[in-house]
Amino acid sequence: MNDLVPLAQAHCLARRGSEHRLSEARIRELLPQVQGWELVEDGHALSRTYSFGNYYETMAFVNALAFMAHREDHHPDLGVHYNRCVVRYSTHDVGGLSENDFICAAKADALAG
Ligand SMILES: C[C@H](O)[C@H](O)[C@H]1CNC2=NC(N)=NC(=O)C2=N1
């Protein structure tokens, strides 16, 4: 990926196969660019919990996220609660993390404001 483009402005590409799975070194480089996200599942996924004022705000975020996921053809796992949403990204097609997960994490942050 072109590192001169901020993650939130990049777009997901079809990434299939283990060659697109990120190295630990690349993950260490990208993680500081998505503040608030943490590595989970032994570095195979990224997760962040967003908090909201009420259910309506939570659902507005979930719907915006779903729209973005459709546009990017990259889909998060979601835990939806009254005033929070747990978002988890990994790339099934590579069996771990790809650049797409970091791009969508940055885009989710931009939506949450
Ligand atoms: C065919 C389609 O593009 C792929 O299956 C996409 C769709 N959305 C996806 N979302 C996520 N999170 N991981 C994937 O590997 C993935 N693959």
Image: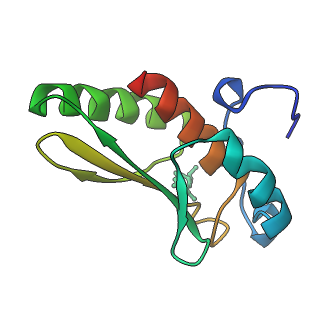
Q: Quadrant of residue 16?
A: bottom right
Q: Is residue 5 left or right of residue 11?
A: right
Q: Which residue is more in the foreground, 74 or 48?
A: 48
Residue 95 image offset from top left, x and y in percent: 63, 73
Question: Residue at the spot x=75%, y=68% of the render?
Answer: 17
Question: Residue at the spot x=51%, y=45% of the render?
Answer: 36
Q: Is residue 97 left or right of residue 21?
A: left
* Quarter containing the N terminus: top right
Residue 34 image offset from top left, x and y in percent: 61, 41
Taking the view exactly as shown, the residue that stands out farthest to the bottom is 42
State which image quarter holds ligand 1: bottom right
Question: Residue at the spot x=62%, y=71% of the render?
Answer: 43
In the displayed structure, 113 sits above or below 89; it is above
Q: Is residue 95 left or right of residue 88?
A: right
Q: Which residue is more in the foreground, 81 or 70?
A: 81
Residue 94 image offset from top left, x and y in percent: 67, 67
Residue 30 image offset from top left, x and y in percent: 74, 48
Q: Is residue 14 something one can see in this rendering?
A: no
In the displayed structure, 68 sits above or below 100; it is above
